[in-house]
Amino acid sequence: MRSWGLWRRTRDPVRCAVFSLFLLLLSPVPSPAGALFEDGYLGLTQEELRTKLGPPQAVRDRKSALRVFRYYTLKDWEDTFKKLLSAESGEDVYTYKREGVDVRYSFTYVTDRNDQSDQPPLWVSAVDIEFSPPVPLGKVPALIPEFRPLADANAPAYRSNLWLLLFKGGAVPQARAIIRSQGQNLTDWTLAFQLFSLQGLPEYLTLQATVDRVEIAPQSPQLTRQRQKLTHDPIMNPFSPEFAQQQPPPPPAAKKIPVPKYAD
């Protein structure tokens, strides 16, 4: 009867909306069950990932807010540093040599917020892939099998002067369990590929532009459209056939050098 009385008191549309939001925030976030997206990694437990890829060659943790890391052997991490820092702060590192390029995978984890045990399970929340040396955009699919962008010219794609952001597939409600940002339950999360260039991307973008790093993680198309308009410029999907057929813009007109006029 209490719930019925509460519903009757919230029949006003505004109150109903607030009440629904309150119930949404209180509802438990569903736990992942295996990989959540087609990349095959996001949502796996650490145990599942290590079964799939084998033991990591190293474990690293972030030394500061910048991209500065400390690296440990797996034995040192498990025996000592995992207890001194936290299991969640360690990233499993795997390195590969592909087509003459060093490709380094680092897996970021989050803990199950609903598990109050001493050792809650760790879930893969992001995959960071670095190249040495930097590689052209067009070579990324050959170096990262998990990177399979859409070929549709209208697929959601954004850019800044330092990175590209590509969305793929539909929203997965279970992905909210691996998101650690404010309001993670109030929006949908989709598989996203973000490609970074330390040297910066040229204004006229081609597949010859180089990138240093790719991040695979859930992102929100809704938040991108609504809140990040100033930093996310929508562009044609760079991995579509139509993008490759674009003609470069004409060179800027040369400015004439002014000629001084002298008195006779």
Image (cartoon, grey):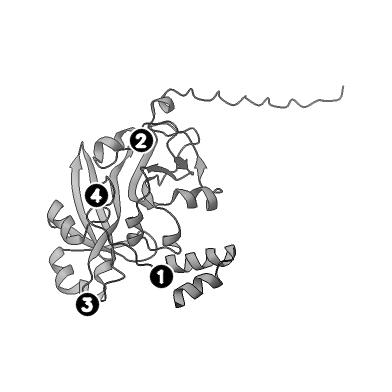
* Amino acid type of the residue that numbered disc 3 sits on in the rendered structure: Asp
Mark 1, residue position: 26
- Quick one: SS at disc 2? loop
Residue nearest the observer in this picture, 36 or 204 = 36
Q: Around disc 4, counting alpha carbons within 10 Å, would you say few (fewer than 14), some (14 to 19), or many (20 or more)? A: some
Residue nearest the observer in this picture, 129 or 173 = 173
Q: Is residue 112 above or below residue 248?
A: below
Mark 2, residue position: 150
Q: Earlier in the sequence, mark 3 or mark 1?
A: 1
Q: Is residue 174 above or below residue 252?
A: below
Q: Where is residue 88 drawn, in percent x and y?
A: 27, 67
- Quick one: SS at disc 1? helix
- Quick one: SS at disc 3? loop
> Which residue does the image show at 44% across and 43% down from the upper left?
200
- Quick one: SS at disc 4? strand
Residue nearest the observer in this picture, 131 or 168 = 168
Q: Where is residue 216 drawn, in percent x and y?
A: 32, 49
Q: Where is residue 5 drawn, in percent x and y?
A: 50, 75
Mark 3, residue position: 118
The Cα–Cα distance between marks 3 and 1, rounded to whole angstroms, is: 24 Å
Q: Around disc 3, counting alpha carbons within 10 Å, would you say few (fewer than 14), some (14 to 19), or many (20 or more)? A: few
Front label number (2 vs 1): 1
Q: Around disc 1, counting alpha carbons within 10 Å, would you say few (fewer than 14), some (14 to 19), or many (20 or more)? A: few
Q: Split into 4 quadrants, where in the image is the C terminus?
A: top right
The Cα–Cα distance between marks 2 and 1, rounded to whole angstroms, is: 36 Å
Q: Where is residue 130 drawn, in percent x and y?
A: 29, 48
Q: Is residue 90 above or below residue 206?
A: below
Image quadrant where residue 201 sits: top left
